[in-house]
Image (cartoon, rainbow, N blue to C red):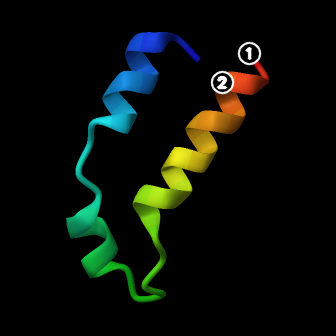
């Protein structure tokens, strides 16, 4: 994943999505984990 893409995803505010999520998933934490995994695999 290009570094600019990682920075954009990392800098986003996911609080609105988390508040609207019917499963109350920790979207910010999940996105951070996904970015970390994609970074390790690239």
The quadrant in which the N terminus is found is top right
Q: Is residue 1 left or right of residue 15?
A: right
Are the residues at dot 2 and dot 1 in contact (C-beta closer than 8 Å)? yes
SS at circle 2: helix
Picture coordinates of residue 23 (x, y %)? Answer: 48, 87
24 relative to 14 in the view: left or right: right
Calculate the distance from the C-alpha at mark 2 to the C-alpha at mark 1.
5 Å
Label 2: how many Cα within 10 Å (few below 14, some 14–19, many 20+): few
Residue 13 vs 41, above or below: the answer is below
- Name the residue furthest right: 41
- Quadrant housing residue 5: top left
Residue 34 percent location from the top left of the image: 61, 44
In the rendered image, the vertical position of residue 42 relative to residue 12, given as above or below = above
The residue wearing badge 2 is 39
Q: Which residue is rendered at x = 37% and y = 36% of the image?
A: 10
| Relative horizontal placement of residue 40, taking residue 8 as reference (left or right) | right
User: Badge 1: few (under 14), some or many (20 or more) residues near its Cα, within 10 Å?
Assistant: few
The residue closer to the viewer here, 1 or 29, is 29
Mark 1 highlights which residue? Answer: 42
């Amino acid at each position: 994943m290009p570094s600019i893409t990682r920075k954009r995803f990392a800098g986003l505010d996911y609080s609105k999505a988390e508040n609207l999520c019917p499963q109350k998933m920790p979207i910010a934490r999940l996105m951070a984990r996904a970015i970390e995994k994609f970074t390790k695999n690239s």
